[in-house]
């Protein structure tokens, strides 16, 4: 007889990320004898937490994160709140003995924001990495498992390319040469987004990070498959610009015009093996969200059109026929021709991501595919990107970080346990 197991889950935040997080837990693949209890939610405003709990069937609302994790002792704690609290909440969760800590992007923000300080970009980079080091050390000491929730890593298309890389290595191929990606929409609706002290930055920090994630991940996987050592970033060049702020007011009609953070970010990463990734994040997409990735290898070109994807085409002469259906994330109107994206939580990797967290609870020897090293390399590249942007876009060396911290095998991907999406002949 299968023994019943209840996995206790807590969530921090009541915004967009928290909403899709709790919905996703109801969509993960069925596991016999396992149930998931949404045990608690926390918010800086208890009223918001109470409303969110009532709407999503969560057992209890809390004002303080530490109080929640210490009382409930969850198996999984989802940190999906405003960015400024990410680091401290991870430390609190680790101290409470949480088994799996799911940390939304970005990993942390510069601690000087909360202290009301100003500093140049290099100082912000160094201090941010020091803070993240303290956060990761706390997780390691506690024996917790950190899942860095970069959903792009978990999309089926990335899983499929990992399968191809494994097969290509058998034929002395499998080199990822050039990667290019984009994440864009018309501006985050989160109130904290345009406040650096809460968000940590704009489009470079909060959008370019999405295609950056799988680019870093695939090079890690390639190196692990090739010689057992991940391939890491070496240097970074970037631009971070405010475009809409400097235009006539009419230019911003269809966008959220940011006043304090960048609405365009471009990052070029050169890896240790002299291969390249280029990613763009911006708040200038008038037609809804755009999530795309293209990879050129020594055996194939692999293009992921995550959203939009042209497998379905819809023409609506009038928008009211669609009612309140959201055909594609951030799509401002369904009228006219559009390319609907059914099951967006699956397509964007959220379900696979949370399934990884659950499997890490159920299997003691399993660790997140997107783990501590992913969080570390992502943060190093993003902060070096702002340093580069502040200095005219020249290259900034990141080897002091990417070679300066050792990671255990369980803090790296395991491509052979990532999962399969292709059939076999």
Image (cartoon, rainbow, N blue to C red):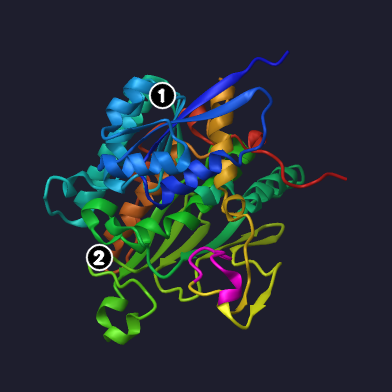
The image's mark for residue 98 is 1
Disc 2 on helix, strand or loop? loop
Q: Magenta span has 322?
A: yes
Q: How many angstroms separate mark 2 from mark 1 (CA)?
A: 41 Å
| Label 1, residues with CA under 10 Å away: few <14, some 14-19, many ≥20 | many
Foreground of the two, 84 or 416: 84
Front disc: 2 or 1: 1
In the rendered image, which quarter is residue 69 located in?
top left
Residue 376 in view (yes/no)? no
How far across and how far down the image is residue 17, in percent? 42, 49
How far across and how far down the image is residue 119, in percent? 15, 54
Disc 1 on helix, strand or loop? loop
Foreground of the two, 45 or 232: 45
In the rendered image, which quarter is residue 188 located in?
bottom left
Residue appearing at x 25%, y 51% in the figure = 198
How far across and how far down the image is residue 350, in percent? 55, 47
Foreground of the two, 404 or 390: 390
Q: In the rendered view, would you say 102 is above or below 99?
A: below
Which one is earlier in the sequence, the residue at label 2 or at label 1?
Answer: 1
**Region of the chain picked out in magenta, as a range:** 320-331
How far across and how far down the image is residue 332, in percent? 48, 73
Q: Which residue is mark 2?
A: 391
């Amino acid at each position: 007889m299968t023994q019943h197991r209840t996995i206790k889950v807590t969530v921090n935040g009541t915004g967009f990320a928290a909403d899709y997080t709790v919905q996703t837990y109801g969509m993960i693949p069925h596991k016999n004898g396992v149930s998931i209890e949404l045990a608690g939610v926390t918010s800086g405003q208890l009223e918001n937490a109470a409303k969110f709990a009532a709407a999503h069937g969560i057992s209890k609302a809390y004002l303080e994160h530490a109080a929640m994790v210490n009382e409930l002792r969850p198996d999984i704690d989802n940190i999906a709140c405003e960015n400024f609290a990410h680091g401290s909440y991870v430390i609190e969760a680790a101290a409470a003995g949480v088994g799996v800590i799911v940390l939304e992007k970005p990993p942390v923000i510069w601690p000087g924001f909360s202290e009301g300080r100003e500093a140049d970009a290099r100082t912000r980079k160094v201090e941010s990495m020091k803070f993240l080091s303290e956060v990761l050390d706390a997780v390691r000491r506690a024996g917790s498992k950190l899942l860095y929730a970069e959903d792009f890593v978990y999309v089926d298309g990335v899983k499929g390319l990992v399968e191809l890389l494994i097969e290509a290595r058998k034929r002395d191929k499998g080199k990822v040469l050039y990667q290019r990606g984009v994440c864009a929409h018309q501006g985050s609706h989160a109130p904290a987004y345009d406040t650096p002290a809460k968000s940590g930055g704009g489009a470079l920090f909060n959008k370019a990070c999405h295609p950056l994630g799988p680019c870093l991940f695939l090079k890690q996987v390639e190196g692990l498959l090739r010689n057992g050592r991940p391939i890491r970033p070496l240097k970074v060049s970037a631009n971070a610009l405010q475009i809409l702020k400097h235009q006539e007011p009419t230019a911003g009609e269809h966008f959220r015009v940011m006043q304090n953070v960048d609405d365009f970010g471009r990052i070029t990463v050169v890896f240790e093996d002299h291969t390249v990734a280029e990613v763009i994040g911006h708040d200038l997409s008038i037609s809804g969200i755009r999530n795309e990735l293209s990879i050129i290898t020594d055996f194939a070109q692999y293009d992921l059109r995550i959203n939009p994807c042209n497998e379905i085409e819809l023409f609506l002469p009038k928008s009211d026929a669609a009612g309140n259906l959201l055909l594609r994330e951030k799509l401002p109107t369904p009228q006219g021709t559009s390319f609907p994206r059914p099951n967006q939580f699956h397509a964007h990797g959220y379900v696979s991501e949370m399934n990884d967290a659950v499997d890490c609870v159920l299997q003691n020897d399993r660790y997140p595919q997107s783990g501590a090293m992913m969080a570390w390399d992502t943060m190093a590249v993003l902060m070096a990107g702002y340093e580069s942007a502040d200095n005219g876009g020249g290259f900034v060396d990141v080897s002091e970080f990417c070679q300066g911290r050792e990671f255990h095998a369980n803090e790296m991907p395991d491509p052979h346990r990532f999962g399969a999406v292709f059939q076999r002949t």
